[in-house]
Image (spheres, rainbow, N blue to C red):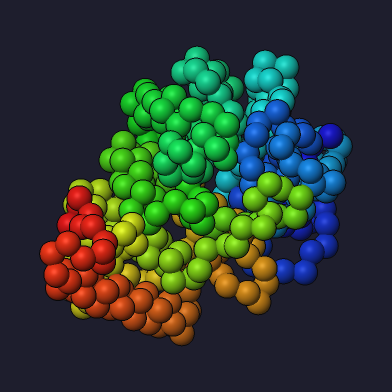
Amino acid sequence: MIRLSAGSAAALQLKTVKTDIQPTTVYLLQGTACRGACLFCPLGRRSSSRSRTYLGRITWPAYPRAALEKPLNQAEQQGLQRICLQSVAEETLERSLLPTLRWIKRLSSLPCSVSVRIETLHQAAELFRAGADRVNIALDAANPRLFARIKDKSFAETQALLFSCAERWPGKISTHLICGLRETEEELLQTGARILEKNITLGLFAFTPLSGTPLGSLPPPEEQQYRRIQAGLFLLRQEPALFLRFRFLQGRLTSFGLAPAQLRKRLSAGSAFQTSGCPGCNRPYYNERPGKTMYNYPRPLTAEEIARVLKILLENLAEGEMLHERKMAAPLGSTAGSRSEHE
């Protein structure tokens, strides 16, 4: 048995799901419980969640492999662009993941991303030899303190492996960060800039509180904050060194170092606010509830949506600039806040 996201099952005509957006990637999940300790995940060993059918806001029904062979073989004809194989940490490469990856590649010529907990360059090499198009090594948390608490691992070791893989397989390594884990915006954007400097594909997720997980009571990020981060990472994908022009006040982004007209022009297509990550991946409703805040748009934005998002972003930045100016005008020795090292 292997699990398939509900949207992917619908796209492969295995399940009827009422949705306005179909995924452009087939998402497969191997394993049901994980020895990993991620505090936001219902599959992790520190989760008390009774429901193992969710990951993000998505259900993952299980299917016999025989039932998936024909649909996977025809996935490209259905307009799907990529296959994403995810695995919990209990699954070993040799016994389960590599055979599954080879099985997928026998069935489909679509590029396949693999997201799994690896610890060595050799393990990454094994995945590429088995047919992976990309390998994802998740950071999730943007600073060492949060990483250690939320993932119970070493940030330095994980980042070192991520960067080593990026050097060994340029343009073939992915990672992702989660906005809303109580990191500062400066920390998230600074880490994002380092990642992008290494030619690593970066996907951004909004923290999703799930019942039964240790972080289930933590609220999701505010939309204004998420738009600032989305826009910042979009600009850094074009020019990672632009981070040196960003301005922060007590960790909160107040300026991109661009005039409003310049910023509006760069963001006017709306692509900054679409799902980011591997090519061909749109992850519809992974972070969102239908009818609620659309953090990552899984399709091109309409003109009305672009106008709304830019209005939120530009007005919010203007408020941040005012706060910054007040702080700068405060008398020496006041408690208005310290200047960011990047100003």
Q: Residue at x 31, y 78 (%)?
A: 319
Residue 4 placement (x, y as % from top left): 75, 46
Closer to the camera in the image, 140 or 95: 140
Place residue 288 in its image quadrant. Answer: bottom right
Place residue 100 in its image quadrant. Answer: top right
Number of dots carrying numbers = 0
Q: Is residue 1 above or below residue 217?
A: above
Residue 130 placement (x, y as % from top left): 59, 22
Residue 73 in sight in this render:
no
The quadrant in which the C terminus is found is: bottom left
Place residue 117 in its image quadrant. Answer: top right
Q: Is residue 295 above or below residue 36?
A: below
Q: Residue at x 70, y 41 (%)?
A: 28
The quadrant in which the N terminus is found is: top right
**Relative side of 334 to 284, left or right:** left
Residue 168 placement (x, y as % from top left): 37, 23
Residue 238 placement (x, y as % from top left): 27, 54
Q: Residue at x 51, y 34 (%)?
A: 148
Q: Is residue 333 above or below residue 136?
A: below
Extreme residue toward the front, this view: 333
**Relative side of 314 to 89, left or right:** left
Residue 152 in sight in this render:
yes
**Relative side of 93 to 245, left or right:** right
Closer to the camera in the image, 37 or 273: 37
